[in-house]
Amino acid sequence: MITKTTTAALGLAGFGLVTGCTETLDSQQIRTGGISATLEAVAESASSTSVTATLKAGGDESNTYIILSGGDRISAEADGETVDMSAESSGVYVARFKTGAADTEFKVLLDREDDDDAPGNTGTLPAPFDLEALPSEPASRGEDLTVSWSPSGTGDDMQIRVNGSCIFSRTIDVGGDPGTYTIKAGTLESTRSDEPETCDVDLEISRTRFGDTDPGLDPESSFELKQVRRDRFPSAP
């Protein structure tokens, strides 16, 4: 396992690069079993999905990112289309597809030049849904706020996230897929209790499934597949 200290030492030897609080490692310097791949397929509509692979050494909470080099490459597949994933930043690779349909199977394939490949990363998207419009007039944080979406009843995990400059961010695990959830009065807390303010609040709701990762990768690897919808509403004290 590559630790922070070890990676820094490799950097001095010309194998890795330390940049601020993060570090990078050339993929030629690590075996497949030491690569932790955090994989996400996020559909923001029924016709658009982004697949992201974040590659790290030392586990999914490490700050050491792996840069693919030499003959090492990563690609994604869906609906019979294969797309080479391009580097968005150090150790982060992205591919985009013009589909977001229910049960679409996505695959992520890591091909190694001098070590074992890891092609067995697979999962299927949950079904698309529509988020009902949120209030256009300021909604009091002292009153219940109901969030609704359809269709529902899939049994997939639902989660709501809210964020705004005048409230503390909250993540709410809804659990199953009931089609409606009431954010109880007082759940959204003002950041300034002495002088609470009104501000626009961003709400994101996601429907999630979990896929499988290749057994040859670091066991902390994961694959989440999501439908995500967003809206904004004014929140008042």
Image (cartoon, helix red, strand yellow):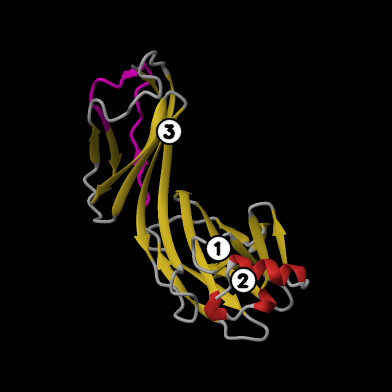
- Residue 47 in sight here: yes
Residue at point 25% right, 55% down? 154
Q: Earlier in the sequence, mark 3 or mark 1?
A: 1
Q: Residue 200: which disc?
A: none
Q: Earlier in the sequence, mark 2 or mark 1?
A: 1
Q: Say which of 52 and 3 sits in front.
A: 3
Residue at point 44% right, 65% down? 223
Q: Which residue is mark 1?
A: 53
Residue contact between numbered discs 2 and 3, judged by CB atoms under 8 Å: no
Residue 38 image position (x, y, % from top left): 49, 63
Query: Which residues are drawn in magenta?
Result: 127-146
Q: Is residue 101 left or right of residue 184?
A: right
Above or below, comparing residue 1 to residue 21 in the picture: below
Residue contact between numbered discs 2 and 1, judged by CB atoms under 8 Å: yes
Crowd band around label 3 with a 10 angstrom C-alpha radius: few (<14), some (14–19), many (20+): some
Q: Earlier in the sequence, mark 2 or mark 3?
A: 2
Q: Residue 74: which disc?
A: 2
Per the image, label 3 sits on a secondary structure element best described as: strand
| Three-letter code, disc 2 | Ile
Above or below, comparing residue 140 to residue 71 in the picture: above
* Structural distance between the alpha carbons of marks 3 and 1: 25 Å
State the residue lying farthest toward the right.
14
